[in-house]
Amino acid sequence: MFWYMESQRNDMVEYFGEQLSGFAFTVNGWVQSYGSRCVKPPIIYGDVSRPKAMTVFWSSMAQSMTKRPMKGMLTGPVTILNWSFVRNDQPRSETCYQIALAIKDEVEDLERAGITVIQIDEAALREGLPLRKSEQASYLEWAVHSFRITNCSVEDTTQIHTHMCYSNFNDIIHSIINMDADVITIENSRSDEKLLSVFREGVKYGAGIGPGVYDIHSPRIPSTEEIADRINKMLAVLETDILWVNPDCGLKTRKYAEVNPALSNMVAAAKLLRTQLASAK
């Protein structure tokens, strides 16, 4: 499946915040994200709404260039909230619901434009989990509900994806399941495949899942054999009909000279495993 690389976008939160009402930005308020990468977090000062479509033009243009499904890419409400400076005159959950309704408008417009696969990234859902255990259940309840608001009106034929970045997901796996996404892609290789342990312990995940097969934060290009080995480890705990093969995260920080061979090796590994599985039947 193809996805649109969003090369004209800046940060995944800033890009949407600049197009939503109720957001403001500093000129030089840079915050370190990781390594040498910095971002300018938005300031949410008022009620949030979406004045007009934000991604439909670019996604539609990309889709017009192929007959294959082209995945539309959005940032989810919980991630936008957790990576912003948030107004303190109302509960964070209320602000998150406002953002969710704005993203819902965008999802509906993408669907009307013929985009049949839409990813709503919730990279920072686990990051916002309160330290106090007494507050965690409440947070997860409104965070999951916010995500479900974004896609509650889509047709059954529209596939909803989400993505989560580097974190410890095992302790919130049941909330991840409750998000009810059709497919979730999730960091796996950089954390030494710790995510797979939750499935070895017997947790059943019925939707599609794509644990990352290589670390996109490294310029290192993984070999076909290395990726195939990772896929085999996943197949030991996941059914073949739910497993997706994908990198850990987005590729925007990588150069084309790194991206092209890495993706070629990933595709080759997937084809190799499909052939082996077919011949084993």
Image (spheres, helix red, strand yellow):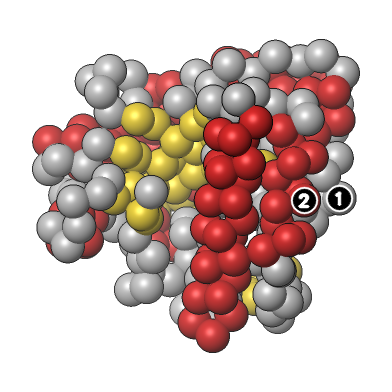
Picture coordinates of residue 260, whole percent (x, y): 50, 75
The three-letter amino acid code for the residue at tag 1 is Asp
Judge whether 210 appears above or below 246 on screen: above
Q: Residue at x 79, y 40 (%)?
A: 233
Judge whether 255 appears above or below 225 on screen: below
The residue that disc 1 covers is: 192
Q: Residues within 10 Å of mark 2 (few under 14, many from 20)?
A: some
Q: Is residue 132 left or right of residue 18?
A: right
C-alpha gap between disc 2 and disc 1: 13 Å
Whichever of labels 2 and 1 marks the residue nearer the N terminus, that label is 1
The one of 193 and 164 positioned closer to us in this rendering: 193
Picture coordinates of residue 40, whole percent (x, y): 54, 69
Q: Is residue 93 left or right of residue 225?
A: left
Q: Secondary structure at mark 2?
A: helix
Picture coordinates of residue 240, whole percent (x, y): 60, 28
Q: Residue at x 73, y 77 (%)?
A: 220
The three-letter amino acid code for the residue at tag 2 is Asp
Regarding residue 30, the answer to whether it shows in the image is: no
Q: Residues within 10 Å of mark 1 (few under 14, many from 20)?
A: few
The residue that disc 2 covers is: 229
Picture coordinates of residue 131, whole percent (x, y): 84, 32
The one of 83 and 28 positioned closer to us in this rendering: 83
Q: Quadrant of residue 154?
A: top left
Regarding residue 97, the answer to whether it shows in the image is: yes
Question: Is label 2 or label 1 in front?
Answer: 2
Quadrant location, the C terminus: top right
Q: Quadrant of residue 214?
A: bottom right
Q: Is residue 60 left or right of residue 167?
A: left
Q: Secondary structure at mark 1?
A: loop
Judge whether 217 appears above or below 280 on screen: below
